[in-house]
Image: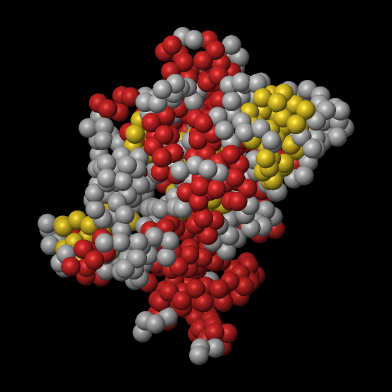
Amino acid sequence: MIDFDHACHLSLKRLLPRIQALIPSQPEHAVFYERLDRHFPTIFRLLFELYGTRYDFFYHLEQTLLTAAQCYLDRPPDLKALDRQREQNPDWFHSEQMLGGVCYVDLFAGDLAELREKIPYFTELGLTYLHLMPLFRAPEGESDGGYAISSYRDVDPKLGTTAELAALAAELRQNGISLVLDFVFNHTSNEHDWALRALDGDEEYQDFYLMFDDERLPQQYEQHLREIFPENAPGNFLLHPKLGKWVWATFHYYQWDLNYANPAVFTAMLGEMLAIANIGAEVLRLDAVAFIWKQLGTACEGLPQVHTIIQAYNALTCLVAPAMLFKSEAIVHPSEVASYISPQEAPISYNPTLMALLWEALATREVKLLRHSMQRRFELPDGCSWVNYVRCHDDIGWTFADEDAWEVGVNGFDHRQFLNAFYMGRFPGSFARGLPFNANPVTKDARISGMCASLAGLEHAQESGHALYIEHALRRIELIHSVIISAGGIPLIYLGDEIAMLNDYSYEDNPDKREDSRWVHRIPFDWERATQRHDADSTPGRIFEALRNLIRIRKVTPALANGTTQFFDSGNPHVLAYLRNKRILVLANFSEHQQTVHLQWVPPDAVDLVTGGSYTGTRTLRLAAFQFVWLAPGD
């Protein structure tokens, strides 16, 4: 048996001279050595779990620590100051002040310089967190929306420069907005320098990827793997004509999976990750986390080593750049999503189940599956937070658990078929205008693309010209945003939804995009439409002012900060009910008909924070079509 404490002590003692040669033991660097003492045992343990059986383990451990030390040296002074602030206030992201927005730089503003000019719009809306979709250099043409990274250190020249990105991050920070960027660490593009070296025959870099001399092992792996994009990227391997080797490419032929069994890959990607931190990213979205470790005979998703790798990166980030948090993107079974969320791994995470079930409840007008799933799955460990959203850049997959559906009397497979038909507008009475994405004719699986307003019925309603349909569509948009703003966690708005932008079908004319229906909602921001945002009689103004009002209320209501959220049965199948931090009662009617709720408890002298209405002395509430109330104790 290995005495880990002794091995850890000896390892650090041996490594210290090399580290001190880079970072002198002077008062200005005392914080680094304090963190090293605190975090090295965790770093050592995790890396030993991954690579301890290798003869060259200690060499790679040294390379990892030296990479981290150099990144600490390279970290700008203002970010080191932010590190110290965040270490003193580690729960900064739990605040009721938090509000996120997400956009593509080119689609929202053109380039980074123009995006800086839009900061007043972000502050007007109330953003404190801005996620800029992938903006690093990627292949021309097909690039999976920028998720095929050709360089983690160079911004796409069409958008600007890395220096401009760092300047933007600093200006956002001065305006109280944290920059969020992606870390695509399962794969690189086939145009990344490492891939090009591999193509030139460099065996060191061929070992950065998963390459096979013949099809024997790929075929064995394939027996247990699922196809992520069966419609336009079937299979998980490609035979590369120049290499004469089979290359692992989970997502697309131009995205080559990295080989994390090679510790040199771990260290190299650490350097890329910390370079992004040093640009000024305060939150790093970990893309496609489930896929990063491969093991023959398994589905190669969510293996234990995945968690070990993320935890190791987390510990090294705590050493070098503790102001930066990880946000996990784990589109996996709902029971597994929470396994990626912890202070030691990713303290914040997307909440895909809530997102999908908000749309499910709009379609069915019933909240039983939404309520039941949230009762089981909303609670998180202390120090962690959901990122709640109604739409994002990606498709909507119906990621509820079949066992949750079964427990409320719903057949999961059949229900997904209904939801797909409904949101494609193919179900009688559907209000939605969505498109299928990645339909699998064998499994009958499909996902849905579309802007929030089109999915919520505004596109259909405006086509019909029916005033009541338009009103109901607008109320649906307000309703589901009210849930993400009040439920607990960080609300995230897909920019464009706040002015009720509709689907844009022009992508069908672009040969690089026409096969990917997600471009129907990855659309240019409509600044002309945005000029109407203060006109309450216009559709953009109605939604913008409604959301801004909810945001203002949240920001002056500490009981809406992160904390406890208790979902319970309202006694009415159409009304979602939850209690925030034991003070604020939220009720939301998912039906277009008035609903009555009889409650055992209402806050004393209750006042609706949304409308100012008084509910003193009553436990029977009537909610109009798609109405929601936030009931707080009166003064």
Q: Is residue 260 left or right of residue 308?
A: left
Q: Nearer the viewer, residue 571 or 29?
A: 571
The quarter of the rendered structure image containing the C terminus is: top right
Query: Residue at (55%, 48%) from the top-left corner?
Result: 407
Query: Residue at (32%, 49%) from the top-left corner?
Result: 228
Question: Residue 88, percent across and down?
Answer: 70, 58
Q: Nearer the viewer, residue 39 or 580?
A: 580
Question: Residue 130, percent across and down?
Answer: 53, 40
Q: Nearer the viewer, residue 389 or 13?
A: 389
Vertical side of 294 occupied by 287: above or below: above
Question: Residue 384, percent across and down?
Answer: 62, 54
Residue 195, picture quadrant:
bottom left
Vertical side of 308 occupied by 562: above or below: above
Question: Residue 172, percent across and down?
Answer: 56, 40
Query: Residue at (42%, 13%) from the top-left corner?
Result: 463
Residue 297, picture quadrant:
bottom left
Query: Residue at (68%, 46%) from the top-left corner?
Result: 565
Which colouring convention does the figure follow?
A: secondary structure
Q: Nearer the viewer, residue 2 or 25?
A: 2
Vertical side of 22 occupied by 137: above or below: above
Residue 225, picture quadrant:
bottom left
Residue 336 can be seen, yes or no: yes
How many labels sit on residues? 0
